[in-house]
Structures are given as structure tokens and as C-alpha cells.
Image (cartoon, helix red, strand yellow):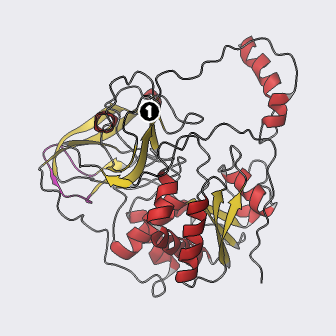
Amino acid sequence: MPIPVRIGKFRGGIHPHDAKERTRDIPIQDFPPPKQAVIPVSQHLGAPAAASVKKGDPVKKGQLIAQAQGFVSACVHASISGTVSKVGAGIFPAARRFDSIVIDSDGADGAAEPVGEPMDPEKVTPDELRDRIAKAGIVGMGGATFPAVVKLKPPPNKPIDLVVLNGVECEPYLTADHRLMLEGPRRILEGLQIIRRIVGAAAGVVAIEANKPDAAETMRRAISEMKIARVDVAVLPVRYPQGGEKQLIKALTGREVPSGAAGTADTGVLVHNVATAHAIARAVFEGMPLIERIVTVTGDAVPKPANLRVRIGTPIGALLDFCGVRDASRVILGGPMMGPAATSLTVPIAKGTSGVLVLSDPAHFEDGPCIRCGRCVEACPIGLQPSVLSILVQRE
């Protein structure tokens, strides 16, 4: 039975310069743990987690410090060992208010406290695997930050036949997923197999854009070496927003997510980011909670660009100092297309922070009167009419 994939295309899209040449060949480097970690209790879509520690409490690295609340929520863990110095309000990207837990490091940084004993995914039930993933606080690490366990509970009447690992990374400048595929392909594929086991999917595919041929070859080689059946690599044309979930499903399978659908289960396809799959494998095989992630630090104002493995809660200012940045007046958390501007250099790295982009002279465009050329309508990947929307916005 063939894998239900065919390389097509989605509606619209654009072709910005990918600007990945500065960091795509730079190996991942471990960034030192911070002296103080500011860990938001809301690093995910859905209900904020509830703090389970208080000021003065000692904590271990990997310890649960905030418990998920409700169905759509995620647990939060300490990324360093030390003492809780504050539990209270802070500021997150885009000036949103949130509660945060501040931990002052004790300098020990011992082994992370596991969320459970190592598991053999073939010898436990799907519910046990879901419970482990929930306890590890894993969310979508491509930027959406949707709690991973929620996507792993599709409605019983909507079976999943295909799991897609999203390694497209179409956002300009970012190379965190690219490097992870080059340096950790086996863990990524182990995560894919765990996801397939949970949802009962017959097949899997790793989707990668054509500007990452080395990643595609590395993943194919790992699939062959691990002798994984019914899993392949799909190389897609470079086109933004190829990595969008709906656009990716359309390009790979020709299936469309119905208008108004809460998820992608109606298409029979489940999409997870490659970094999410990697984190899932670590949670299952090592008992490791989500306390760190890969972050690309780049931009024309960064003298020493890097791909860094960073603890959650590390202030972005520490990363910029490490990379030799002197003028950080224009800082974006993520890529230039979707990333919010940083409100302060004390803003912490969170579970969904895939990059820190620093630009000295970003492109600036002055808007003018719409001449009804229709190019915006052609480019919109979901069929909107931006020319009409702009008129309505101006009337406000």
C-alpha cells in the first residue's frame, strides 16, 4: 500500500529570500544555563498552568513547577536548579501579561529530574504514552505552541492515516529545525514512530523544503538505517508559507482542511514539528521534560550568528551578548514574517521561541493607495481579499 503523498502545491504564496546562509552550516552549540531563569506559566495556547511552587522553595532541574489546567494546557518545569525568588506578573512578547516563576541558580545544574522511568513505546499503551507527553509539558515547537497531547487525541470517528513531521522551516533566517534534522535524525524518527503508534497511523512522512537537501538526505539515510517501514521524506518547492499546517497538507496530499474545522483530523492527517517529535522521543525514552530548545540567533546586526541549545527562561539579552550584538534596537522573536518584536532584552526564551533575529536596517515599506492590481489576492494562501480588508481597516 503506497504512502498517501503526492507533491503538489497550495494556493498563493510568495518567494522571499530565505536568508539562511549565515547559520545553516553552523552546528548546534550548548548555551550555558542562566544565573536566573524567568519561566512563564503560559508558554502555550490554552489555559495558563498554575504555579505549584512559591517564593523560597528549592527546585531541581526538570521539576514540575506549574501544573496544566484543563484540556488545552501544558505543564511547566524548572530549567535550572536553585531557589524560587518570585512568583508573579511579568511581560512576554507583544507586551502580553503573564505570571512567571523566577529561579535563582544554585550553580549545581545536576541531572534533570525525569517525569518517569524510560519507556518502551511498543510495550505500553497509547494512553500511557499520551500521559508521559502531557507530564513532560511538550507543545508544538514550530511556533504554534499548541499542547502536543491534545493533537494526539483525534476524535474516534476521524481516524488518522498519515503523520507528517514538519521540517519545512519556511520562515526566513531560521535554521533551528534544519540543524536538528542534521544532528538528531534518529530521535526525530523515534518521535515519529511514537506518534504513529499513539494515533494508529499507517504511514509517515518528513516534509522538507528543497533548500535543505542535506537535511533530506540525512533523514532518508536514517530511515534506511533504522529500517522504518512506510515512512519517507518529501521534498517540497521553496515557497512561503509552505510550513503552514493547512498549506502543507494541501501540498502533500491534495486534501483540504474544512472551513471552520478546529484541527486537521477531518483530513486524516496529523502534523507535528520535527522538534516536537524530538522532544516526544526524549520524554518517552529518557523521561526528559521540555526544559530547553534550539534557537537560531541571526540577522545583519549579529557578528557571530549561532544555533544554540538554550534553557527555557534564559533572557534573550544573554544570547545577544554571547553572539557579540552591540546594537539591539530591532529584535524579533522568531522570523521576520510571523515573529513579534521583543519588548525588552529581559524577555525570556520560551518553548515556542525558534529564533532571535536582530536587524540593523530592516526593510521599510510605505503603504499607498490600492490600485486594485489583484496581486495580494493571488498571493493569499487562504483565499482572502486583502485589498478589501485594507479598505475596511482604514474606515476604522
- The front one of 87 and 280 is 280
Please tell me which residue is depicted at 63% across the width and 52% down the height of the picture: 211
**Where's the C terminus, which quadrant?**
top right
Instruction: State yes or no: residue 246 in magenta.
Output: no
The N terminus - image quarter: bottom right
Residue occupying image coordinates x 57% and y 66%: 152
Quadrant position of residue 389: top right
- Locate residue 357, reporting x and y percent: 46, 34
Q: In the image, 59: left or right of 235? A: left
**Residue 265 in the image: above or below residue 201:** above
Q: Residues within 10 Å of mark 1 (few under 14, many from 20)?
A: some
Secondary structure, mark 1, is helix
Q: Which residue is mark 1?
A: 93
Camera sees residue 67 = no
Q: Position of residue 294 (x, y in %)?
A: 41, 52
Q: Position of residue 218 (x, y in %)?
A: 54, 68
Magenta residues, as a range?
A: 52-63
The residue sitting at 49% across, 39% down in the picture is 334
Can residue 225 be spotted in the picture? yes
- Location of residue 250 (image quadrant): bottom right
**Figure quadrant of residue 131:** bottom left
Mark 1: which amino acid? Pro
